[in-house]
């Protein structure tokens, strides 16, 4: 996970590079560097730490350049250090590269290059690329990069700058994202669109297996056979972010599978240097303000509302602060009790949801401090709120939200931990234990994703159902609501979620032979009560699919099917249990032949009330 920028044009290149790197800092933050041509000489400056460290160093330097590349890193090969930071040189210091991805065969390449007399100075896999280009170069920079990459196994986006060609930048993309921007006599590269938006909204979306070359005459794109590639210009707006399916049949499945990375991105920059604490440095709230709040109001719509329901449990449990959760479409019309001691938390993936924006404005008119949780930099919610926590989920194209939901839920945990610390409601040891559990979640979701076939088989059994019910208690009830929403919005099956204890107050009338019921059973202190409710379903001949953390003999004895999640503290279970529900909804919709990414009657960004 790294951020890449490149610039060729008529502005000071270093200023453009640094602005882009700051925008992309969420993609990597343990070191940063830039390479540029200063009066024809290739210079590289890189520093361990946040981008501010590099920024401070550059303030002591002088240059005159209109071409350069930059990188912000999250370490994979080699510890964070000045030496391991990108860009990397070859032996001659005539080529500089930045790289996003992993070179899987770097060890054997490095061994061969060392035997050929090349000198290495870093621990990284990336440095081999500079030496491979050095070997391959015969006067054509683009072909040198292509020939070097043909020796590489792994994932990459690579950007190359050379003293031999002071008028061009060459880049290649395999698996990792890369976009090229077209300005007024200037051209850009970036690993993500936000870095380009201050300068242009006209971009090319680079595909796997393409090489792009920036020159004063424009942008040239070819494939690895050096054949020209024609692309349409994509005009960016934040209501319809660009993305690619990347080989997946649907954006939704791709985005479900992207959740481990999205959660890492959201968590990473908020961890302390020691990795055992949370630091929400992006919010302006002082400790005195946080201690002065006597209530939190969480306001959102749809999936974001369900994330807010998890947030209520988390904030009340950790910070011991009363929390209300409101549907944004109802918030203004109930004349809510608000005052300056109420913190209003607005949650919106797009940051443009009309009802949510109206609720935000209502809260501000009543003197409340508004904290926004959103995925889109520069959105209306982000601009109008007093504080913003970005989820960094990346572009989410499927209408049914998946990775936006889990990253919103993660932010609720981070906010709860921050408030609990400031309010003295949690010990450092308790904080460290929760942080450790959150850090394990991305890997645990990877394990859940390996159960896709089991979940698809369940969907094949039940996709013709007319009704499906979801049950849960405590945090499981909040997740059950989201599971039911996912199923109904993309498969068009009637699905409802209930707090399990409410079954006997009417819902049991709907249970009959063969009706599928999904029972979330991840809360240890409520497990026996939940299973009593499951037995009530079984007594009416309903069919029960259980979700458990680790092996659960009680669930296996009682349920018809059991999906086993990795063992984890019950408190963080919502981040895990929702994933099989997303997959179940996806495979149910696929079996029914539905338009999964664009379900009927729905839109991604709801900009009307």
Image: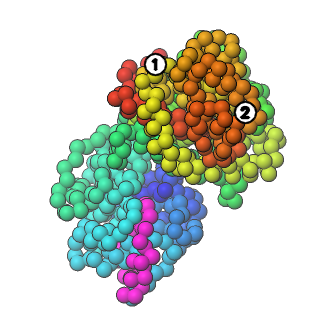
Which segment is the magenta one?
Answer: 90-116
Q: For the residue carrying disc 1, how many other residues have a C-alpha within 10 Å: few (<14), some (14-19), or many (20+)? A: few
Residue 91 among those drawn in magenta: yes
- Residue under the image location 44 percent in, 64 percent down: 102
Task: Give the vertical position of 109 relative to 555 (above or below).
Answer: below
- Is 92 in front, or is 572? 572
- Residue under the image location 54 percent in, 67 percent down: 47
Q: Is residue 371 left or right of residue 420?
A: left
- Residue under the image location 65 percent in, 11 percent down: 506
Residue 281 among those drawn in magenta: no
- The residue singled out by tag 1 in the image is 466
- Residue 439: x, y in percent? 63, 51
Name the mark on residue 527: 2
Q: In terms of secondary structure, where does tag 1 sit?
A: loop
Q: In terms of secondary structure, where does tag 2 sit?
A: helix
Does any portion of residue 305 appear in the rendered image? no
- Residue 518: x, y in percent? 58, 28
- Is 112 in front, or is 392? 112
**Occupied quadrant, residue 478:** top right
- Is 366 in front, or is 410? 410
Q: Is residue 535 left or right of residue 376?
A: right
- Residue under the image location 49 percent in, 39 percent down: 455
Q: For the residue carrying disc 2, how many other residues have a C-alpha within 10 Å: few (<14), some (14-19), or many (20+)? A: some
Task: Give the vertical position of 586 relative to 210 (above or below).
Answer: above
Q: CA distance from mark 1 to mark 2?
A: 28 Å
Name the mark on residue 413: none
């Amino acid at each position: 996970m790294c951020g890449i920028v490149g610039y060729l044009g008529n502005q000071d290149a270093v200023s453009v590079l640094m602005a882009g790197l700051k925008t992309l800092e969420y993609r990597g933050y343990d070191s940063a560097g830039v390479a540029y041509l200063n009066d024809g000489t290739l210079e590289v400056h890189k520093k361990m730490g946040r981008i501010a460290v590099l920024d401070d160093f550059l303030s002591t330097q002088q240059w005159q350049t209109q071409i350069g590349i930059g990188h912000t890193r999250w370490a994979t090969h080699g510890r964070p250090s000045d030496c391991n930071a990108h860009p990397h040189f070859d032996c001659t210091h005539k080529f500089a590269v930045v790289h996003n991805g992993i070179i899987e065969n770097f060890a054997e390449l490095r061994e061969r290059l060392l035997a050929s007399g090349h000198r290495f100075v870093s621990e990284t896999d990336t440095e081999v690329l500079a030496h491979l280009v050095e070997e391959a170069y015969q006067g054509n920079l683009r072909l040198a990069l292509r020939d070097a990459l043909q020796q590489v196994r792994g994932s990459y986006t690579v950007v190359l700058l050379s003293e031999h060609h002071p008028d061009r930048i060459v880049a290649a993309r395999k698996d990792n994202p890369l976009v090229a921007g077209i300005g007024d006599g200037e051209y850009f590269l970036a690993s993500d669109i936000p870095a380009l938006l201050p300068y242009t909204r006209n971009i090319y979306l680079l595909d796997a297996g393409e090489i792009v070359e920036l020159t004063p005459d424009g942008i040239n794109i070819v494939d690895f056979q050096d054949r020209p590639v024609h692309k349409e210009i994509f005009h960016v707006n934040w209501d319809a972010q660009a993305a690619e399916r990347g080989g997946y049949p649907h954006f939704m499945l791709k985005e479900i599978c992207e959740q481990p990375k999205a959660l890492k991105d959201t968590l990473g920059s908020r961890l302390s240097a020691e990795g055992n604490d949370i630091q929400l440095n992006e919010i302006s709230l002082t400790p005195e303000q946080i201690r002065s709040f006597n209530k939190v109001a969480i306001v959102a719509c749809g999936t974001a509302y369900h994330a807010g329901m998890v947030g209520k449990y988390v904030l009340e449990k950790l910070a011991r602060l009363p929390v209300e959760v409101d549907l944004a479409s109802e918030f203004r019309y109930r004349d809510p009790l608000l005052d300056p001691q109420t913190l209003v938390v607005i949650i919106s993936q797009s940051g443009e949801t009309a009802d949510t924006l109206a609720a935000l404005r209502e809260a501000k008119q009543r003197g409340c401090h508004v904290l926004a949780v959103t995925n889109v930099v520069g959105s209306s919610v982000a601009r109008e709120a007093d504080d913003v926590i970005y989820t960094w989920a990346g572009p989410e194209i499927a209408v049914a939200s998946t990775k936006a939901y889990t990253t919103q839920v993660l932010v609720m945990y981070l906010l709860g931990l921050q408030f609990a610390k400031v309010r003295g409601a949690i010990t450092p040891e308790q904080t460290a234990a929760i942080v450790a559990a959150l850090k394990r979640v991305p890997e645990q979701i990877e394990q859940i994703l390996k159960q896709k076939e089991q979940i698809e088989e369940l969907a094949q059994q039940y996709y013709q159902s007319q009704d499906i019910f979801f049950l849960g208690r405590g945090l499981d009830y909040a997740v059950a609501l989201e599971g039911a929403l996912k199923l109904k919005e993309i498969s068009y099956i009637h699905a409802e979620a209930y707090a399990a204890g409410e079954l006997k107050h009417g819902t049991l009338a709907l249970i009959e032979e063969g009706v599928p019921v999904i029972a979330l059973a991840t809360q240890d202190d409520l497990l026996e009560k939940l299973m009593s409710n499951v037995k009530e379903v079984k007594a009416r001949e309903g069919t029960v699919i259980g979700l458990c953390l680790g092996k659960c003999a009680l669930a296996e004895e009682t349920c018809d099917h059991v999906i086993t999640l990795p063992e984890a503290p019950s408190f963080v279970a919502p981040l895990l249990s929702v994933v099989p529900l997303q997959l179940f909804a996806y495979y149910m919709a696929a079996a029914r032949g539905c338009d999964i990414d664009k379900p009927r009657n729905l839109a991604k960004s709801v900009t009307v009330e």
